[in-house]
Image (tube, grey):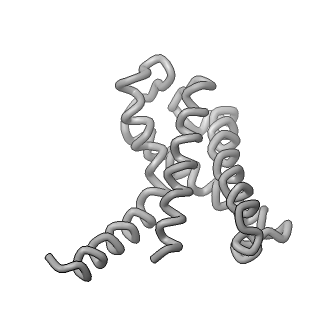
Amino acid sequence: MSKPNKNKFFASFVIIAGLILPIFLPAFIMMALVKFVPNEITHSGIMSLFILSFALFIIAGIFSKILSLVGLTEQKLDELGSLGLIISVLSSFFSIIVGYYWMKTFHLTSVELSSIGILIIAVITTFVLAALIRMLEKL
């Protein structure tokens, strides 16, 4: 396999991951963590994890819209450099935590996460998505 084909495969893989991971990454992480820390995550089924993950994606979109209304658009965050990256990462982190507790308060999810469990999921998801965004920017 020649080098251009490898680059096309990697670019295709990153683009497909960029479409799927932001929506379903928390669900994948929760499925993996259930085996290692069963006391932190309790769920009624796999579908409840995916529904929660999709809802967290929608809440992250709402956080992003609020940031743009305040004046922090994607272009502005790119112009800010590393400060923009920090703001973007913190926004993602807080949207996961606030989104989960909001859904739990209004009884919109059957997934029970401990405080440590939601922090683990938020941190891993944030770092993976930040790395994915950086890879997409390099393409």
Res. 62 in view: no
User: Can you give x and y, in whole percent of width and height, for residue 98 in the image?
Assistant: 70, 41
Q: In the image, is 106 to the left or to the right of 136?
A: right
Q: In the image, is 99 to the left or to the right of 16?
A: right
Q: Nearer the viewer, residue 112 or 81?
A: 81
Residue drawn at 55 percent across, 49 percent down: 127
Q: Where, quadrant-wise, is the C terminus in this rendering?
A: bottom left
Q: Nearer the viewer, residue 17 or 44?
A: 17
User: Can you give x and y, in whole percent of width and height, for residue 68 in the image?
Assistant: 77, 69
Residue drawn at 52 percent across, 46 percent down: 125
User: Can you give x and y, in whole percent of width and height, for residue 40 in the image?
Assistant: 51, 22
Q: In the image, is 59 to the left or to the right of 26?
A: right
Residue drawn at 52 percent across, 42 percent down: 124
Relative height, residue 134 to residue 79 (above, below): above
Q: Nearer the viewer, residue 65 or 116?
A: 116
Relative height, residue 55 to residue 118 (above, below): below
Relative height, residue 136 to residue 4 (above, below): above
Q: Where, quadrant-wise, is the N terminus in this rendering?
A: bottom left
